[in-house]
Amino acid sequence: MIVSLAVPAVLENLLSTAVFFADTLLIGWMKDPASLAAVGLSGTYLFIAQGVVMALGIGALAVVARAWGAGDFAAARRAAGQSVSLTFVFTLLMVPLMILLARPFFSLLVQDPNAQMRETVIGLASEYATIIMLGSLLAYPRFVLSMVMRAAGDTRTPMYITLLVNVLNIALAAALIFGIGPIPSMGVRGAGIATAIAQAIGGLLSFGAVLTGISQPKLTLREMFIWDKREVSRIWRLALPNIIESAIQRVGFVTFMGIVSSLGAAAIAAHQITNSIESMSFMPGSGLATAVSTIVGQALGAGDMRTAEIGTRRSVIFGILLMSSIGAAFVAFGTQLSGIFGATQEVLSLAANTVRISALELPTLAIYMIYSSALRGAGDMRSPMIVSLIGAVFFRVAAVWFFAVQLKLGLNGVWLGTAIDWLGRAVIIYALYRRGRWKSLVV
């Protein structure tokens, strides 16, 4: 069961990450550190809004999986439909605000000592983020619909939709970034337009899948757009700790990126390359985490505690083995992996070192991802929130500042601090899982 749920989820998450990976790769071949830095910083900004959407999706997954496991399909459909309603409200409020605040945000974050470089990065990042946000009106509901489909045990349909999104994004991005035939070269703007179009089409396909019954739970427009205060309150109660957790993570991450940006445009560009490479390594852990959320939620709904525990334990073992193997590949081939981005030699040299250092965090990241997802699948959203607070304040920012600034290790210190952060979070989340509070929760 773990494999049947996890493999499509791994592929979907891999493909989801590949959307921005492709943008980074193609922009890298422009050999312009400012453009590469702009795309990387935009990811930081977009990460803020996506966190709230994913929190709503996690809350929906916990409710839908529990109801689906108990055989109450009507309740599962109600919860799924109301999660979409809630996401639409959030999206309509958030998108204009994010567009309005984009330039002020980047103006605060970018601290390159070269004034011309600073203004270039701010302008490109603001434009890219604004274009992506316009496509989010359909992309954000898609994230939640993917969670809902997974909760019902369908991890294949989201995977197929994400595959199509990737194909469209890569084809459009290559044409718009570099120009082809009558289409002029648009650089970073072209990357943003391609991604926004591809993500919007993915949103339409996700709606089509649940409205037509291609995927479960099959929903009607009424279930998605008629407000049910009781059901929305239930989802919101579960989502709120995740939203708080997301806010904590984002504040910590913005502070963290402030340290990175103080190192200059080359460091930001190298950091973005390392992030893009490392993000692909998350996929085994992320896919197993998705499978665990569904298994635990459905097993508890059916009153089968043993399946929930065995599924979690085996997923952790698989995750550690897989992500440790990827870490070994990072150490052996760090130079070759960073080299595919075609950036300047200074940027590639920095990235090769940090790719190798990033290998340190992969086993503990697998532990954290899977145990935290098991807790969320059971409806325990508070424990991961506590761990995120501790990690953001006492591990991530403090450790990164100590290594990068105090010990003057620069970007290498940033990634050493990150490895310590994930180690600390893994230890705490395991202790909270072993405590067993999740076994008796009512959602």
Image (cartoon, rainbow, N blue to C red):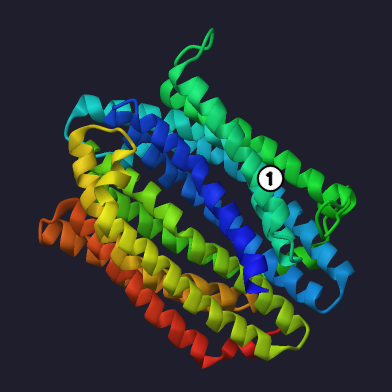
Give the percent coordinates (x, y) of residue 436: 56, 91
Residue at x 26% of width, y 31% of height: 118
Give the percent coordinates (x, y) of residue 90: 65, 49
Vertical comparison of 412 with 393: above or below = above
| Residue 296 quadrant | bottom right
The front one of 300 and 351 is 351
Q: Is residue 425 left or right of residue 70?
A: left
Q: Is residue 105 visible?
A: no
Vertical comparison of 359 with 170: above or below = below
Total count of labels: 1
Q: Amino acid at mark 1?
A: Ile
Q: Is residue 78 left or right of residue 173?
A: right
Vertical comparison of 225 with 101: above or below = below
The front one of 283 and 51 is 283
**How crowded is the residue under tag 1: few (<14 C-alpha within 10 Å), some, or many (20+)?**
many
Q: Quadrant of the N terminus?
A: bottom right
Give the percent coordinates (x, y) of residue 259: 24, 51
Give the percent coordinates (x, y) of residue 98: 52, 40
Mark 1 sits on what residue?
161
Question: Label 1's element?
Answer: helix
- In this view, which residue lies farthest toward the left? 407
Residue at x 47% of width, y 15% of height: 179
